[in-house]
Amino acid sequence: MADAPNTNDVLEQAVNWLSAGKKVALATVIGTWGSSPRPVGSQLAVDDAGEFVGSVSGGCIEGSVIGEALASIEDGENRILDFGVTDEQAWEVGLACGGDVKVLVERADDKADLDRLTNQRPVATVTDLASGKRSTVTPTEDSGELSLSAEMLEGVRQTLLDDRSKTLDDGDNKLFVQVFNPPLRCAIIGAVHISQALVPMAQIAGFDVTVIDPRGSFATEARFPDVTMSDEWPDDAMKDFKPDTRTAVVTLTHDPKLDDPALEIALKSGAFYIGCLGSRRTHASRLERLTEAGFGEADFARIHAPIGLDLGATSPAEIAVTILAEMVAVKHGKLES
């Protein structure tokens, strides 16, 4: 089965296999050092026939991991696998890329639990790597086999906010926290040339993209295939869209009648990125209008304008690259939001 790097796809396939009466194991990257090809939290699901979906490396250790997953399906035992360039086993399975990888393999029997991880996000699982006991933690609740201290719960919830799975120390125990967040979203105001380039780039980067433009000649399926489009006015569309902390908002029309209503809703939301096309003079006029609308300096500091990293871009495609680069940099804390 082809690789599917999206963790949600992996869990959905695991649920499908369980529903069909198959036995399933999950393999999860719980630690990486050096130039590992897949980040912590990456998953691979295996059924009892040896079919798999997902990836825990660039393909170099999958064969060994699948073999251990099949063994876990048979005996029900969790396994922690270590692969590194200094290990003979690593060379046997092809991990000569200069990185070390630690993988947790566990049988997955609870379809309802996997359904929750797929459908009730944001949520984190907390696994005691020694005992295999597990709990689930949301922003407001926790449940399961582990008794987590208030301090540990705070750490787990911060990990959920940071959107990065990792291992936490709880005294003598190591707890692996795996984050399951809703997809990142991007609202693009204006079905313009830059948008045509930005949409597929953002989709590849993992964003669910919506293009908003009430101008029928701009927002056509021919110009924007395979993307959600809204022909409502931006104020109505953005109210329905409901931007949140996993949302980037990009305004590209140069038309205050379209950009400003969307921008005002974005500023009242928790959107992690807000970017606006236009020169510094255009932005100064924009800030004057926002001031009249009741916004202040703290709001203005959230706006990235002129939009995009300064890479000397000139063409629509190059400008789209700078916008996506800025969105990613803000998401990972490399730039202020």
Image (tube, rainbow, N blue to C red):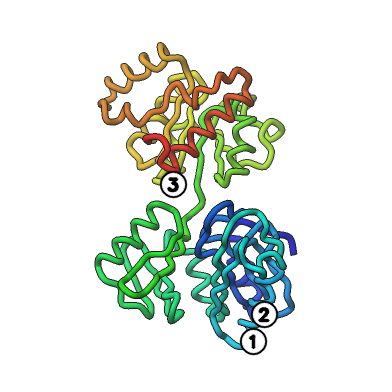
- The residue that appears at 36% across and 14% down in the rendered structure is 285
- Residue 113 vs 203, above or below: the answer is below
Residue nearest the viewer, comparing 92 with 76: 92
Q: Going 26% across and 71% down the picture, which residue do you hit? A: 149
What is the tally of numbered marks visible in this picture?
3
- Compared to residue 315, the image places residue 127 above or below, namely below
Give the label, 3 or 2, closer to the camera.
2
Image spot of residue 33 (x, y percent)? 52, 57
Left of 154 or right of it: where is 28?
right
Determine whether 121 is above or below 280 in the image: below
Amino acid type, residue under disc 2 in the picture: Leu
> Is 66 left, or right, of 283 in this rendering?
right
x%, y% of residue 272?
A: 40, 40
Instruction: Using the rendered view, name the quadrant where residue 106 is placed.
Output: bottom right
| Disc number placed over residue 70 in the picture, else none | 2
Residue 197 picture location, percent across and down? 64, 30
Q: In the rendered structure, are the residues bearing label 3 and label 2 in contact, judged by CB atoms less than 8 Å apart?
A: no
Task: Please say if 51 is above or below 34.
Answer: below
Indicate which disc, 3 or 2, sits on the residue closer to the N terminus. Answer: 2
Classify 10 Å Cα crowding around label 3: few (below 14), some (14-19), many (20 and above): some
Q: Which mark is residue 246?
A: 3
How far apart marks 2 and 1 lie (CA) works out to: 6 Å
Dot 2: within a 10 Å radius of its alpha carbon, few (fewer than 14), some, or many (20 or more) residues? many
Quadrant housing the N terminus: bottom right
Q: Residue furthest top?
A: 281
| First-in-chain label (1 vs 3) | 1
The label shown at residue 74 is 1
Residues tagged 2 and 1 counted as in contact (Cβ below 8 A): yes
Q: Is residue 305 left or right of residue 39?
A: left
